[in-house]
């Protein structure tokens, strides 16, 4: 699949935003329930605002991907069948909920409403992230995406980048950071594990669809003679993007190195000061952008088979 | 009703006449508007087509042959292109199973083209909307046309009569009969889209009479004449 930069930016940015606000909300809820060392109201408000900006920037960027954005408002109408529609509806519901929650925190509202708002915000962030993953996972013609590991990956990577952002926000506010370093490390391990399992399962995946099932010629060898068009088509532009196997291997090694190993070393080897947290966030962001790029570049739509690819 | 095409791979000669007729008819149709061409007279001509024909080689020389494979929308019974569409622009008509795109609702997100395994959907860069085969819905129900012309443009244009249009729900339609008798099949059936369009495989070659034993020696008269006449 051709990597669409607007979609890559959208999923990385809003993923981090949803992860950040979900973790903030959970930390707040734990604190209400009697936990110690949670973020202060100011920190929740500031972090929440950053999360909202990230989500909004991502959603705006996703509309750049549309060829006819005038009709974008219609995208909320097929909630019952379309994961893209569901994502839109939940993202739209998320905004007033999250904004209301942050307002309650700012205004110092009572325990009950604040806890309910926090819980609703967290759940909506989770559902929206899940919907994003399901948009890809529901596509049967793309075997690399049609896997339960895809929504799990979107959730894990969102929380991982959110945990790093949370650490940076708290380090900036001078809040004691050690539990949040552990939180970030925990999500790092989960996200890296999901991604490595995904890469391994993709390498072993055996495509059920071959040129034989595509042409209905069940036994003989079938080979493309002529693709029937003289220059590119919509199909070749959109689906016939290829990345050399060697490049993909180097690229995925870079994803692991920049996205996981550098933040891991940064968090393990030095006290979590603001510059260290920012370094970890920057490396993870670059790593996740690369990860998303290869998520597209390595996805092989079955229509390529008809093109001899 | 389950309207669709039946394509005879045994007789298709791969001439692209159906694709050209499709482009001509639908390029001026009100259903999907013009089908844009990009750089039609430039170095790299390209554009929107609803029907594309690709050519394959089956088997190894000397037991090889050519397969011409025309492909347009299969009007799938389980059309994921419709379920993924967030705007409701893509829909499947309950009355006859034709899958269409409402050009006034499409936002050009491409998701339906990702969900279609057959490459049947193409985005028109000029309008920013998705377009695809309409099964010539503006021909097949047009009472102004003579009855024999109420068929898709591609079916009428095919010089080899390799394309058949009909109701595949009706076991007595010519299309259904052909599928039954010839062992018609759908493409990529393992994906479960239940494509309505069916393809007919090559017929068993008719035996051609060949002489296997040497002819008996000619009679005396024949030998005499043969000797008399120089060849
Ligand atoms: S062939 Fe593609 S566009 Fe046509 S109905 Fe099937 S999935 Fe949809
Ligand atoms: S491109 Fe148009 S028809 Fe296709 S899914 Fe998007 S809105 Fe629906
Ligand atoms: S049925 Fe009509 S729209 Fe579809 S391929 Fe044939 S000519 Fe084109």
Image (cartoon, helix red, strand yellow):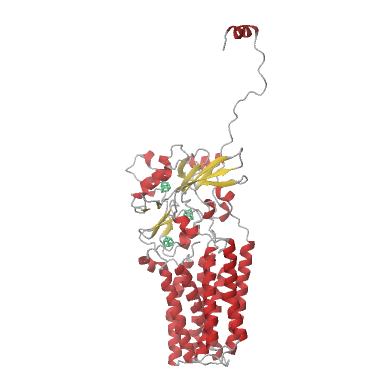
Q: Nearer the viewer, residue A32 or A249?
A: A249
Q: Is residue B97 above or below residue A34?
A: above
Asked whether residue B138 appears in the rendered view, the answer is no
As drawn, the residue found furthest toward the left would be B144
Name the residue rendered at 63%, 73% in the picture: A193
Q: Position of residue A202 (x, y in %)?
A: 61, 64
Horizontal side of residue A113 vs B42, given as left or right: right
Name the residue rendered at 58%, 34% in the picture: B205
The answer to which quarter of the image holds residue B204 is top right
Q: Nearer the viewer, residue A173 or B79?
A: A173
Q: Position of residue B126 (x, y in %)?
A: 35, 58
Name the residue rendered at 44%, 89% in the picture: A104
| Quadrant, the C terminus of chain A | bottom right
Q: Nearer the viewer, residue A139 or A165?
A: A165
Q: Position of residue B189 (x, y in %)?
A: 56, 52
Q: Position of residue B206 (x, y in %)?
A: 58, 31
Asked whether residue B73 appears in the rendered view, the answer is yes
Q: Is residue B198 above or below residue A183?
A: above
Q: Nearer the viewer, residue B77 or A180?
A: A180
Horizontal side of residue A219 vs A83, given as left or right: right
How many numbered circles does the render carry? Answer: 0
């Amino acid at each position: 699949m051709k990597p669409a930069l607007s979609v890559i930016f959208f999923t990385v940015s809003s993923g981090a935003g949803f992860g950040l606000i979900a973790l903030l909300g959970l930390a707040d809820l734990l604190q209400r329930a009697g936990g110690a060392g949670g973020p202060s109201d100011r920190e929740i408000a500031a972090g929440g605002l950053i999360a909202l900006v990230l989500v909004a920037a991502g959603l705006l960027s996703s509309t750049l991907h549309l060829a006819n954005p005038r009709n974008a408002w219609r995208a909320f109408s097929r909630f019952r069948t379309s994961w893209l529609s569901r994502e839109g509806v939940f993202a739209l519901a998320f905004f007033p909920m999250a904004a209301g929650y942050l307002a309650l925190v700012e205004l110092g509202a009572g325990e009950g409403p604040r806890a309910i708002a926090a819980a609703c915000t967290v759940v909506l962030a989770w559902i929206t992230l899940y919907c994003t993953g399901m948009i890809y996972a529901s596509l049967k013609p793309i075997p690399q995406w049609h896997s339960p590991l895809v929504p799990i990956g979107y959730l894990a990577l969102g929380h991982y980048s959110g945990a790093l952002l949370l650490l940076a926000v708290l380090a900036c506010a001078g809040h004691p950071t050690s539990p949040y370093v552990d939180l970030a490390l925990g999500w790092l391990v989960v996200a890296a594990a999901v991604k490595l399992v995904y890469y391994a399962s993709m390498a072993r995946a055996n495509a059920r669809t071959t040129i034989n099932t595509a042409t209905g010629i069940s036994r003989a060898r079938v080979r493309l003679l002529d693709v029937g068009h003289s220059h590119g088509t919509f199909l070749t532009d959109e689906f016939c993007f290829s990345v050399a196997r060697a490049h993909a291997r180097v690229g995925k090694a870079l994803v692991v190195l920049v996205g996981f190993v550098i933040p891991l070393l940064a968090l393990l080897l030095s006290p979590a000061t603001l510059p260290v947290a920012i370094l970890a966030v920057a490396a993870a962001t670059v790593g996740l952008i690369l990860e998303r790029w290869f998520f597209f570049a390595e996805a092989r739509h079955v229509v390529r088979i008809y093109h001899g690819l | 009703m389950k309207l669709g095409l039946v394509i005879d791979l045994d007789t298709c000669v791969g001439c692209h006449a159906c694709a050209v007729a499709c482009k001509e008819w639908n390029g001026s149709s009100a259903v999907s508007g013009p089908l844009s061409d990009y750089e039609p007279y430039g170095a790299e001509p390209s554009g929107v087509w609803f029907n594309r024909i690709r050519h394959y080689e089956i088997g190894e020389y000397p037991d090889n042959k050519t397969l011409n494979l025309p492909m347009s929308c299969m009007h799938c019974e389980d059309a994921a292109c419709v379920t993924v569409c967030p705007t409701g622009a893509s829909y499947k008509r309950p009355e006859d199973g034709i899958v269409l795109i409402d050009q006034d609702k499409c936002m050009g997100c491409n998701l339906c083209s990702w969900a279609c395994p057959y490459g049947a959907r193409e985005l028109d860069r000029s309008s920013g909307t998705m377009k695809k085969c309409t099964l010539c819905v503006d021909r097949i129900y047009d009472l102004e046309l003579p009855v024999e012309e109420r068929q898709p443009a591609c079916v009428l244009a095919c010089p080899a009569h390799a394309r058949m249009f009909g109701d595949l729900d009706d076991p007595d339609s010519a299309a259904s009969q052909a599928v039954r008798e010839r062992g018609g099949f759908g493409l990529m059936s393992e994906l479960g889209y239940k494509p309505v369009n069916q393809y007919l495989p090559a017929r068993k070659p008719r035996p051609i009479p060949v002489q296997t034993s040497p002819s008996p020696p000619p009679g005396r008269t024949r030998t005499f004449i043969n000797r008399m006449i120089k060849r």
